[in-house]
Amino acid sequence: MNCDLIVVGGGPAGMLSASTAAAKGLKVILLEKNDKLGKKLFITGKGRCNVTNYGDRDDFFHHVMTNPKFLYSAFKTFDNNDLLALLTSLGVPTKVERGNRVFPASDKSSDIIKALQKHMQLGNVCIKLQTEIKKILVKNHRVTGVLLHDDKQISAPKVILATGGMSYRQTGSTGDGYKMAQQLGHTIIEPKPALIPLITQEKWVKDLQGLTLKNVSVKAIINNKVQAEQFGEMIFTHFGVSGPIILSISSLIKKHIHPPTNKPIQISIDLKPALTDEQLDARLQRDFNKYSVKQLKNAFDDLLPKRMIATFLQLSGLDIHKQVNQISKKERDLLVHTLKGIPLTVTGTRPLNEAIVTSGGIHVKEINPSTMESKIVQGLYFAGEIIDVDALTGGYNLQIAFSTAYLSGLSAARV
Ligand code: FAD
């Protein structure tokens, strides 16, 4: 079987690189080891697919955590507006939500998958499912084709490797591409979890398992210095903390977590970030007037989620049975202090398989940023999460996949 280009991997990056090259006239074969395309894409954004972010160029690069400069050409060639125009042309209207997050208007990730499939169909891309690649074939530093799992070969002068990262392995992203590229002389920056829940030392988090806190501010403090701060939503789990702002914090402090630096990482949760200490004290006084003859444990129903109250008071160290009108100013200060900084100690992250994205991958120094072509093997290109780039949540990771995919497909179609 012969063709101009083989794309390995049927995720968002593989699908867009295949359809882009096909639209430019190449005869393209896409090989995917699963029995369907876009298994990970299907579960993105809790099934709604936060497909990109509507922010401007600076905002995009501000949210890329690893090697943003490497992405300049890719984003210039195909940015978020280009992606939205393409989706519209393929019959998928989109909507913009809080934080400029873009979703398909239908709230269905499957609509994005269908659109990418349609784009491939329009270019007559030959799609082969349940086809696992085990090796890229190379002669004299030039790609000659691929070797399939059943030892059959497909010849082509160009290959785009878009096998993704190494998390949520059940979706097919098992790091195969790293091994294949390494065999060809590429350096792999060690894959590590990014956008990952944090494990904490404190056992009380387990009592609050499932409790979501909205509109809170979380700080990560290392060596008495605030290294990251995020505002929004988090959740307690049986092992520690998770939720959007915790995932972002995990990426922002990843150099301190991997490898463990032995420096303790403190998390401080401000339950009332909109109020200063003085405003919060005034608020407490109002509530304490209202509940003056109640015990302390019954005076926080207006201020905190019910499930949080016992833990909060325990952390403050005050007697929960004390009558509210007996509380001194000093004790109120202690309550304010605790409300503004619930302390947690991070001991690690959940395993790589639970990461939203993989940090690490193909070393960017070995890829031409203007074409996505390998600097080691001619005719080999990379697209998507396999490259050592990753971003915060908000649609940026899919935009990285789409921008690098488009550029790789376009470059492969050039002579
Ligand atoms: P993948 O999507 O991982 O695709 C790689 C494909 O290659 C897979 O289909 C795999 O089966 C195939 N493959 C692997 N090895 C082989 C082989 N040897 N032979 C043949 N095929 C092979 N990002 C956002 O921007 N917005 C979100 O809302 C969002 N939500 C997410 C939610 C979850 C739960 C997770 C896990 C991730 C989320 N992400 C989100 C991140 C985003 O899904 C990834 O960054 C993106 O899917 C990467 O695309 P990719 O095409 O590079 O890799």
Image (cartoon, rainbow, N blue to C red):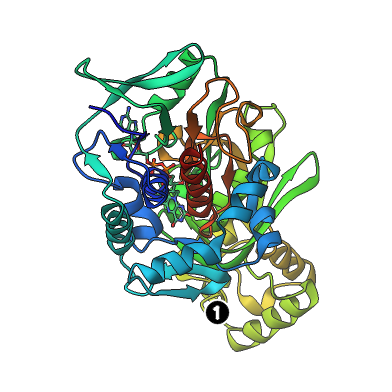
- Whole-percent x, y for residue 133 in the image: 30, 25
- Residue type at numbered disc 1: Lys
Q: Please report the residue visible at 32 percent of the width from the left and 71 percent of the height from the top.
A: 91
Number of residue marks: 1
Callout 1 secondary element:
loop
- Whole-percent x, y for residue 31 in the image: 28, 35
Q: Please report the residue visible at 54 percent of the width from the left and 67 percent of the height from the top.
A: 81
Q: Please report the residue visible at 64 percent of the width from the left and 48 percent of the height from the top.
A: 73
* Picture quarter with ligand 1: top left
- Whole-percent x, y for residue 6 in the image: 35, 33
- Whole-percent x, y for residue 98 in the image: 53, 73
The image shows residue 74, relative to residue 352, as above or below, that is: below
Residue linked to disc 1: 294
Can I make out residue 344 in this image?
Answer: no
Which corner quadrant of the image does residue 139 belong to?
top left
Location of the N terminus by quadrant is top left
Q: Nearer the viewer, residue 127 or 394?
A: 127
Which corner quadrant of the image does residue 50 belong to?
bottom left
